[in-house]
């Protein structure tokens, strides 16, 4: 909490909190590989701090940041939670079932292969969402991080269906969903809940 308060006192911290886009957008603004790596680390830390603060009682968590900031963050948290619950409860078939299936698969696969999710959980969430959409659209979890001339043909071929051939053979995940423990972007988590995936997806523009 003290780290969050200290961060929010800085101009950059306040800008990130009030921005409509998530901190991860900084990665796209970075012009060099070193800057991108730094942006990814900073984005992950910002998200972690905000999630930690939002998990506490609002009055206690935001008392150091002033009433206006507290009101903005509390409103944002309620809105994101409502949107996440709406996505989970909507339409018992199709999308929500596939999202649940791909989340369960991802959790099991990390443990079976000794790999880890990215230190920024929004990376795992957006990839899982893409896999679920392809599972609905194509009948197979085609890798969502590549460009295809013919998605239907690629899904039938199976080479890029998750887990793709490079992942199965060499533990190389183009999407950064499954990372080896020595990867600089690997976190320490091998599990992510369906609720967290839905909440992170709902918070994206």
Image (cartoon, rainbow, N blue to C red):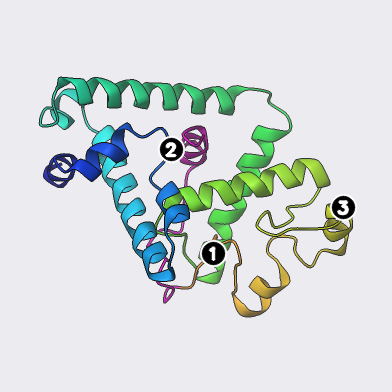
At a point 74% along the width and 55% down the height, the residue shown is 142
Write down the region rendered in magenta: 181-205
From mark 1 to mark 3, how far is it between C-alphas? Answer: 24 Å
Residue 24's mark? Answer: none
Residue 201 within the segment the image draws in magenta = yes
At a point 52% along the width and 47% down the height, the residue shown is 125
Q: Is residue 55 visible?
A: no
From mark 3 to mark 2, how far is it between C-alphas? Answer: 32 Å
Q: Residues within 10 Å of mark 2 (few under 14, many from 20)?
A: few
Q: Residue furthest front?
A: 31
Question: In the rendered structure, which disc, 1 or 3, sits on the residue that comes first in sequence?
Answer: 3
Figure check: 54 above or below 112: above
Where does label 1 land, which residue?
A: 178
Which SS class for mark 2?
Answer: loop
Which SS class for mark 1?
Answer: loop
User: What x and y, as percent, mark residue 42?
Assistant: 31, 55
Q: On the image, which quarter does residue 57 sit in?
A: top left
Q: Is residue 85 visible?
A: yes
Figure check: 108 above or below 75: below
The answer to whether the residues at label 1 and label 3 have Cβ atoms under 8 Å apart is no
Does residue 62 appear to the left or right of 177 in the view shown? left
Q: Residues within 10 Å of mark 3 (few under 14, many from 20)?
A: some
Where does label 2 land, which residue?
A: 21
At a point 58% along the width and 27% down the height, the residue shown is 87
Magenta stretch: helix, strand or loop mostly: loop
Residue 107 within the segment the image draws in magenta = no
In front: 62, or 162?
A: 62
Residue 152's mark? Answer: 3
């Amino acid at each position: 909490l003290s780290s969050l308060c200290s961060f929010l006192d800085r101009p950059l911290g306040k800008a990130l909190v009030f921005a409509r886009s998530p901190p991860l957008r900084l990665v796209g603004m970075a012009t060099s590989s070193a800057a991108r790596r730094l942006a990814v680390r900073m984005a992950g830390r910002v998200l972690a701090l905000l999630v930690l603060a939002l998990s506490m009682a609002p009055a206690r968590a935001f008392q150091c940041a002033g009433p206006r900031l507290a009101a903005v963050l509390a409103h944002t948290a309620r809105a994101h939670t409502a949107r996440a619950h709406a996505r989970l409860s909507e339409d018992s078939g199709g999308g929500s079932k596939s999202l649940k299936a791909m989340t369960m698969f991802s959790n099991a696969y990390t443990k079976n292969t000794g790999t880890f999710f990215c230190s920024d959980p929004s990376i795992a969430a957006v990839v899982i969402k893409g896999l679920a959409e392809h599972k609905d659209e194509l009948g197979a979890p085609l890798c969502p991080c590549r460009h295809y001339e013919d998605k239907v043909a690629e899904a039938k071929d199976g080479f890029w269906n998750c887990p793709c051939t490079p992942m199965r053979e060499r533990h190389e995940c183009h999407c950064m969903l499954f990372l080896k423990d020595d990867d600089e972007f690997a976190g320490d988590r091998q599990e992510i809940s369906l609720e967290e995936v839905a909440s992170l997806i709902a918070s994206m523009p």
